[in-house]
Amino acid sequence: MIRIAVANQKGGVGKTTSAINLATALAATGQRVLLIDLDPQGNASTGLGIGANQRHRSSYDVLVGNTTVSDAVVNTPIPRLDVLPATVDLSGAEIELVELEARTHRLHKALEVAPADWDIVLIDCPPSLGLLTMNAMVAADSLLVPLQCEFFALEGLSQLLSTVERIRARFNPSLSILGVALTMYDRRNRLTEQVSKDVRAVLGQVVFDTVIPRNVRLSEAPSHGLPALIYDHRCSGSEAYIALTRELLARLPRQREAA
Ligand SMILES: Nc1ncnc2c1ncn2[C@@H]1O[C@H](COP(=O)(O)OP(=O)(O)OP(=O)(O)O)[C@@H](O)[C@H]1O
Ligand SMILES: [Mg+2]
């Protein structure tokens, strides 16, 4: 089971859009995928059509120890894609977790005892570097960082990377950066081009070749409760996420064949 946290403390950079569409594309390639919604906004759950009435148990319940991952998981209409949904309860978790034992390892421990029902687990993080994101980073093997091509993109990144360093030093030495994905790319915008050049110059190979274009279909899809890949699989955004999925799979350690 490979665990990838989709993280960036900056809001609205495409974490959830990336998590939903990568999860969908990975499932389409035959991987059994679990998407963990670790954001109190619950956008990943909503974007996959999981209504409030289907969120009997949530990622909050798993973190505080009310339930197990298996008991809280909801199937989506997409074959091989399951979701551990989020509810607004999660907004209290940052504070409640402080009181609990092993507060940074709650998700890690819950996944350790979960059955091996999934090949890949994607964790959609909230826009902060608080305890929820720390739980994701402790539980994860690697990070996928969506980065919006705008002026302050790199500035936020150094803060994220120093958090990764701290997590490595204290809790999870093997945490790696799987890749940085440039999102909301607008070829007509010179700033976008410049930022993307700068980011590649500074970060090099870790930046995926694939860029996710700014594409209105990607932003429309969640209101239909569908991944863009299902809503309109031929739009430029969907095609980009398919290409990104190929790159991502190529970077993953080769999975053991099922016995
Ligand atoms: N490539 C894109 N083109 C156009 N719109 C996009 C694209 N990616 C994301 N969006 C839209 O931008 C907004 C923010 O995207 P998203 O929710 O994926 O970001 P996020 O990083 O998860 O945000 P938050 O930090 O609030 O969780 C959403 O309305 C989404 O539909
Ligand atoms: Mg989000």
Image (cartoon, grey):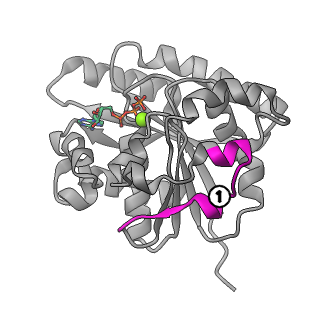
Residue 119 sits above or below residue 175 on the image:
below
Q: At which x and y percent is residue 125?
A: 53, 36
- Can you tell which quarter of the image residue 137 is in? top right
Q: Is residue 67 magenta?
A: yes
Residue positioned 18% across, 31% down in the render: 187
* Range of residues picked out in magenta: 61-77
Residue positioned 50% across, 17% down in the render: 156
> What residue did someone put label 1 on?
69
Residue 23 sits above or below residue 166 on the image:
below
Kind of residue indicated by mark 1: Val
Judged left or right of residue 171, residue 247 is left
In this rendered view, identify the residue nearer to me: 36 or 202: 36
- Per the image, label 1 sits on a secondary structure element best described as helix
In this rendered view, identify the residue nearer to me: 167 or 83: 83
Q: At which x and y percent is residue 51?
A: 36, 52
Judged left or right of residue 62, residue 22 is left
Q: Is residue 9 visible?
A: yes
Residue positioned 69% across, 54% down in the render: 67
Give the crowd class for mark 1: few <14, some 14-19, many >=20 residues within 10 Å: many
Q: At which x and y percent is residue 76?
A: 40, 64
Ligand 2, what quadrant?
A: top left
Point out the image quarter for the C terminus: bottom right
Residue 67 sits above or below residue 182 on the image:
below
